[in-house]
Image (spheres, rainbow, N blue to C red):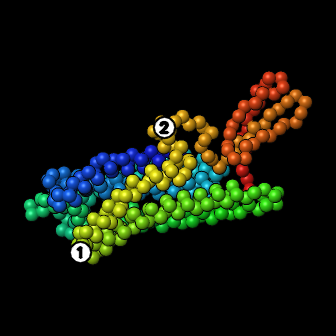
Amino acid sequence: MTNCFIVSLAITDLLLGILVLPFSALNLLLKEWPFGTTFCNIYISLDVMLCTASILNLFMISLDRYYGVTAPLRYSMHVTPFRVAIAMCVIWVVSLMVSFLPVHLGWNTKDKSIQNSRESNDKECKLELNKEYVLVDGLLTFYLPLIIMCLMYYRIFKIAREQAKRINHANCCNAVSPSLPAVREHKATVTLAAVMGAFIICWFPYFTVFTYEGVNEIDVDETASLIVLWLGYANSALNPILYAALNRDFRTAYQRLLHCRRVGPQSHETPLTLLHIRRTDDKPPQIMQNAHEVKLSMAQDTNGKEGTPFLMNKVER
């Protein structure tokens, strides 16, 4: 199910790079908008919609990972294809509601007129703000998702540390080197810190300026506005790096999406351990497990009969 949100995030960031960033760069270089007011409002609507969808996709990925870590045995019950489809619809409906509707109906301007429709502003293209629009958009698409994501990642991090400590303790009792769990804990820490750090660094300055400007109904310095805006754009460029390079699950999903190489089903990590039980005619079942990778294999018994794979869950006792 995570792959659906990854594909949605990848498509969103790609569309932002194709449909929005070239015009943003051109507007910055020319210091004026050369395409007229109608296209200006379409461009701004696309900008707001795609940035919002990118943030909400990150939020849904965080929610998916939270259920995968905190309730692995009930994951398939919580995260169903129907619920994923509903979540995808919510992402794009909310993104449309805070972009095209306000911009083209005048809900975001101080005088409730359609923005950039005045003759004196035909060479200027910017998102106008009023207090109501800023509060609704900021809370719905950034501040509330940010708070929930921080709480979820904190919970995930605590669970990962507790599991690593238990594994380290068990390995010490068995005189086994604890380096592997320690490395895994370190990687988990780096991944979580990178994801949340990039998200906060890239978007928090923009929404701070966005909220301040709308609530106080004043125009912030243009240079500061451009800096925080492009910092937010940078998050879309960082997403593929963070979610693919730092996490094997997401890297596998990108490889499948891009067909970079053939990836077998065994390369995708899950909270389950696959055990193989090989039966013989005169011996009790033998359980084989690879300690480092999750693999499903088929074995032959002494009479040439095919063994039976069993799916076992990891349960901490």
Whether residue 226 is situated above or below residue 47 in the rendered picture: below
Taking the spot 20% from the left edge, 58% from the top edge, the residue there is 29
> x and y percent of residue 148 in the render?
50, 64
Q: Is residue 104 visible?
A: no
Residues at discs 2 and 1 in contact (Cβ within 8 Å): no
User: Where the C terminus falls, by quadrant?
Assistant: bottom right
Identified by mark 2, the residue type is: Cys
> x and y percent of residue 157 in the render?
60, 63
Query: Which of the numbered marks, if any, corresponds to residue 218?
Result: 1
Does residue 215 appear left or right of residue 113 in this picture? right
Report the front residue among 128 and 178.
178
Identified by mark 1, the residue type is: Ile
Report the front residue among 125 and 116.
125
In this figure, what is the number of numbered marks? 2
Does residue 58 appear left or right of residue 92 in this picture? right
Query: Which of the numbered marks, if any, corresponds to residue 311?
Result: none
* Secondary structure type for disc 2: loop
Tell me the crowding category of disc 2: few under 14, some 14 to 19, or many 20 or more residues within 10 angstroms, Cα based: few
Taking the spot 44% from the left edge, 62% from the top edge, the residue there is 199
Residue picked out by circle 2: 260
